[in-house]
Amino acid sequence: MRRVVCLAFAIVISTILLLVSCGQPGATTTTAPPPPTGTTAQPTTTTTVPTAPVVAKPKYGGILTVTNPTDPAAFDPKASNSLLAPTLNLTHDELLTGDWAKGPAGTGETDWLLGNLGRTDVLTGLLAESWEMPDGETIIFHLRQGVHWALDPNNEASRLVNGREFTAEDAAWNIKAEWAFKGSFLALTNPPSDYLVDARAVDKYTVELKVPAHVQGLHLALDGERLYMFPPEVTAKYGDQKNWKNNVTVGPFMLTDYVTGSTVTFKRNPNYYLTDPAGPGKGQQLPYVDGVKWLVIPDLSTRLAAFRTGKVDVMLSVVAEDAEQINKSNPKIEQKQTYGIVYLPAGREDKNLPFDDIRVRQALNLAVDQKAIVDGYYEGRAEIVGWPFYNTKDHEPFYTPLEQMPASVQELFTYNPEKAKQLLTEAGYPNGFKTNIVTGSAEGVDLLSIVREYLLKVGVDMEIKQLEGGVFTSVNRGRTHDEMLFKETKMFFAPWKMHEVRKESLDNLSFYENERTRAVYDVINANLGKNDPVWVKAVKDVTPFMLEQSPYIWMPAPYAFHMWQPWVKNFYGASDVGYFTPQRWTRYTWIDTELKKSMGF
């Protein structure tokens, strides 16, 4: 099996099918007691009943060690894209977050592997205690009282802030500043018509937002969960907060040291305001660990070796091939099955190319033996339907099994080159056509080479072009590809954005547009943050139609695994507790230092 690209930021962004951990319910055998004296004995029966997981009370202390292939590229989301600043998930909080108590540590309503998916029923307050939308253009956040910026006496910027209280003035400044910066995540991923109108402090603990009515729910999601809070006076003094040494946190950890290409070090914030919302530690102050050590290790084999030898505590999105080897050498490793990121070939429908004909698009899908790719390329370690939803707890409200979809959709996941040729002929391409596709990786070339061989059998000659990483990124984000592009999908973690089927979305590389999917997007915007069941059902109901429309060549979703050492507790593989918030789980996780020591580490 070839290595495949998986979601490396838990990012993001991952899903679950299987839980294998010491906290998983097991089974016990119970023998019925003997009958009373003087009665006729009934046959002794053996009954298997489930037992509740034994979960120890969390303990404080220890250092949690994680790893990443690259250095953080930024630290200030008001001077760069927040996606380039992954340390913020450890150091800086937002107004809202995913409710940890509704995940596997609590009620199990979600797995917290893919984020909240736009659902407000799994959200809770973080720096805000509550929120309201009194009319269609207003969002009001009511802040927690008594929350203070962390005070690190060894940090000049921290001494400047001096541990003062977090207020509505802070929140309003942050929200306005990030929307005003044209290079921010918010500004880059939304058209100007959707931008914030205004934000102001009503009083010390109340912040009021004015937003465009057609995207009120979007602003609840973005301004509540994608906007990290920084102290304004640090920017006032230094011009920005791009220097990591000027990071002042209101979150669970303080960034205390950074050695480029080596280590990022975080220290526990002793005055963090949040308490554990679920489990045996409910009510205890967070975080549990004394700190987090983030090792920068570019080479995958070196990262895996560090994990096998206990130098790293958690590895996210490990491909199935590597996970099998780890299980052989480290059979006590805990793990949870998830998925690697799915890449799809997209052909432009906006340039008078063959792809603007649905018959051509469906022919390309029928020409590719997707089951053979699952069985051969992935050695059975993949799901044949890789977009837009998976059979997981997170996706449960959106998901329809393939076997329950219309026959016309099911047919697209069968191998039928004769039907493909027929459709191409009907579309005016009896001899097929030539095209080209660009990718930014060698792994992409590997998989596309298989797709190309299938397409050649129906007369479609797809030339593969591998671009250098920076060039590919430019082509990808600018959507300047000639005909086809091989790109990762986004709908699996942001269904409410419908990225792959909105023509204006930068992540729609096919330029697909349809009045039916547009109508669903309108339903989403009318109900997001207000009436989840309505928009969720609309997305679920339109999914078979989107698949039948074939704006992409459908590809399988490869399995991957979140893996962690036996001494890492209260993790469950819950890698994304909110809207694209990797590393948030670190505040809830604790280290069983005694177990670690007993295992020789």
Image (tube, helix red, strand yellow):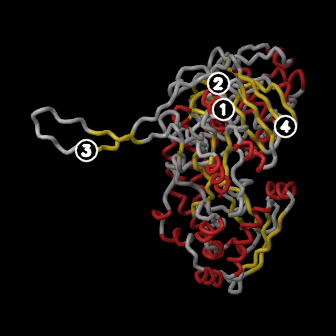
CB contact under 8 Å: marks 1 and 4: no
At label 2, which amino acid type do we have?
Answer: Pro
CB contact under 8 Å: marks 1 and 2: yes
**Mark drawn on residue 24:** none
Tell me the residue at 58%/79% (across/down). 416
First-in-chain label (3 vs 4) = 3
First-in-chain label (3 vs 1) = 3
Which quarter of the figure has residue 587? top right
**Mark drawn on residue 262:** 4
Helix, strand or loop under label 2: loop
At label 4, which amino acid type do we have?
Answer: Ser
Residue bearing mark 1: 586
As drawn, 43 above or below 265? below
Residue 209: % across, % down? 67, 30
Residue 484: % across, % down? 76, 67
First-in-chain label (3 vs 2) = 3
Which quarter of the figure has residue 180? top right
CB contact under 8 Å: marks 4 and 2: no
As drawn, 443 above or below 267? below
At label 3, which amino acid type do we have?
Answer: Thr
Residue 564: % across, % down? 63, 40
Residue bearing mark 3: 45
First-in-chain label (1 vs 2) = 2
Residue bearing mark 2: 287
Q: Nearer the viewer, residue 178 or 346?
A: 346
Tell me the residue at 75%/67% (across/down). 446
* Left or right of residue 394: residue 587: right
Number of other residues with Cα within 10 Å of mark 1, as a class: few under 14, some 14 to 19, many 20 or more: many
Residue 83: % across, % down? 76, 41
